[in-house]
Amino acid sequence: MAESRVEIGFDGGLIISAKVADEEWAKVESALAAGSGMVSFNAEDTDHHVDVSKICYVRREARVGRVGF
């Protein structure tokens, strides 16, 4: 299962930073495209329920945990 490091910033200053599986991230992207409503997703064994209208920014790093030279 592929995952990404995601940072979601909210109105008021709260930030969620976690590793999110690609299947869970697809839920967030769909909700962002809709522009409003609630989205539920799991990140690092924690359920998050987010009001999409309160999101100010999203940052996603697709390459997480790569070790090597």
Image: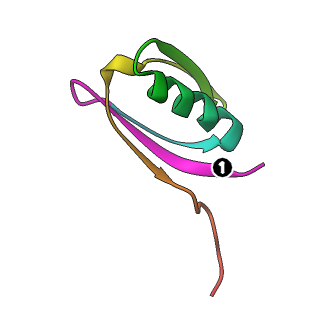
Q: Position of residue 3 (x, y in %)?
A: 66, 49
Q: What segment is highlighted magenta in the picture?
A: 1-14
In the foreground, 57 or 32: 32
Side of 49 where 51 appears, left or right: left
Inspect the magenta stretch and tell me whether residue 10 lies in it: yes
Up/down of 34 relative to 24, above or below: above
Up/down of 37 relative to 3, above or below: above
Q: Amino acid at mark 1?
A: Glu
Q: How many marks?
A: 1
Q: Name the secondary structure under disc 1.
A: strand
Q: Quadrant of residue 51?
A: top left
Q: Residue at x 53, y 18 (%)?
A: 39
Q: Position of residue 43 (x, y in %)?
A: 60, 34
Q: Residue at x 47, y 29 (%)?
A: 33
Q: Which residue is mark 1?
A: 3
Side of 3 where 38 appears, left or right: left
Inspect the magenta stretch and tell me whether residue 18 lies in it: no
Residue farthest bottom in this picture: 69
Crowd rating for badge 1 (residues with CA inside 10 Å; few <14, some 14–19, many 20+): some
Up/down of 58 relative to 36, above or below: below
Side of 38 where 68 appears, left or right: right
Q: Residue at x 55, y 28 (%)?
A: 30
In the foreground, 52 or 42: 52
Q: Residue at x 45, y 11 (%)?
A: 37
In which quadrant will I find the C terminus?
Answer: bottom right
Residue farthest top in this picture: 37
Q: How is the image coloured?
A: rainbow
